[in-house]
Image: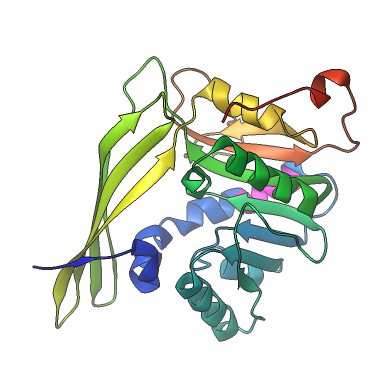
Amino acid sequence: METIEGHLYDFPRYYDLVFGSDWKAEFDFLVKCFPKHATGSVEKVFEPACGTGRLLYRLAKAGYQVSGLDLNDKAVAYCNQRLRRHGFADTAFVADMTDFRLQSEIDAAFNMINSFRHLQTGDAARDHLMCVANSLRRGGVYVLGLHLTPTNVEPSEHESWSAARGSLCVNTRLWMIERDLDERLERFCMTYDVYTPTRSFQIQDSIAFRTYTAPQMTELIDSIDDLEVAATYDFAYAIDRPIVVDSSTEDVVYVLRKRSARLNSRAARTRRVTS
């Protein structure tokens, strides 16, 4: 099989197939989560690291006003083309998720599939949460999904799955090559085995993630005065079954809500995050 060394995000059609097949569980969860945990109505929603817009255009079809950003211009072009195809405006734009400002406040934001962990430092993670907090109205929510590093069970180290659409099939494999909890770093190799009627080939890439234990994530969230944890769920996306995050938790969805009033205490002002 022909092998291509490349960035997986530079192949939005294949990326969308691989990560778009599970859209319904996430979509159904979001449309239930917004009214349950946000105060007031939710109309404007935003996705940092929106990728190909697999959820954005579906939320637009459900009546939400949507926008998103991504650092990859190919993914943004794919997302906007998809929005146009379904009769919506181009509302995705190229930007850094650690340094952005929206033109108007939003009611909700979401980032469902670990993209947050691409941010390699504590400062970058905090800058991102600050940007989201500054973009949300009071009572708005940020739905953030990621993998934690459990401390009393062995964390997952490999995963594989397949997806098909018409005559296109992609088999995906992800496996760990390095974990350094002192440096807060995990490195993975990832491959797409792509099969079309006329060609088969493999795309190879490596991915680096920042690690978070449950206490480290709590410390980070607590450093953002305007955000509070409204609820936590796992990747079963059962809106009626929130979870308690503990040392064995690996898959978690944090529902972060912007406080109705700014927290103003000496303790809040002196919080720090270890980079």
User: At x 56% / y 34%, what residue is drawn?
Assistant: 233
Direction from residue 256 to residue 234 in the image, left or right? left
Q: Position of residue 93 (x, y in %)?
A: 62, 71
Q: Nearer the viewer, residue 167 or 7?
A: 7
Q: Quadrant of residue 267?
A: top right
Q: Position of residue 28 (x, y in %)?
A: 57, 53
Q: Which residues are magenta?
A: 30-36
Height in image: 13 above or below 113?
below
The quarter in which the C terminus is drawn is top right
Q: Nearer the viewer, residue 270 or 1?
A: 270
Residue 156 appearing in the image: no
Direction from residue 253 to residue 222 in the image, left or right? right
Q: Position of residue 245 (x, y in %)?
A: 55, 23
- In this figure, what is the number of numbered marks? 0
**Magenta segment includes 34:** yes
Q: Position of residue 97 (x, y in %)?
A: 61, 55
Height in image: 179 above or below 133?
above
Q: Main secondary structure of the magenta part?
A: helix
**Magenta segment includes 150:** no
The quarter in which the N terminus is drawn is bottom left
User: At x 64% / y 79%, what residue is drawn?
Assistant: 90
Outermost residue, left side: 1
Q: Quadrant of residue 21?
A: bottom left
User: At x 50% / y 73%, what residue is drawn?
Assistant: 73
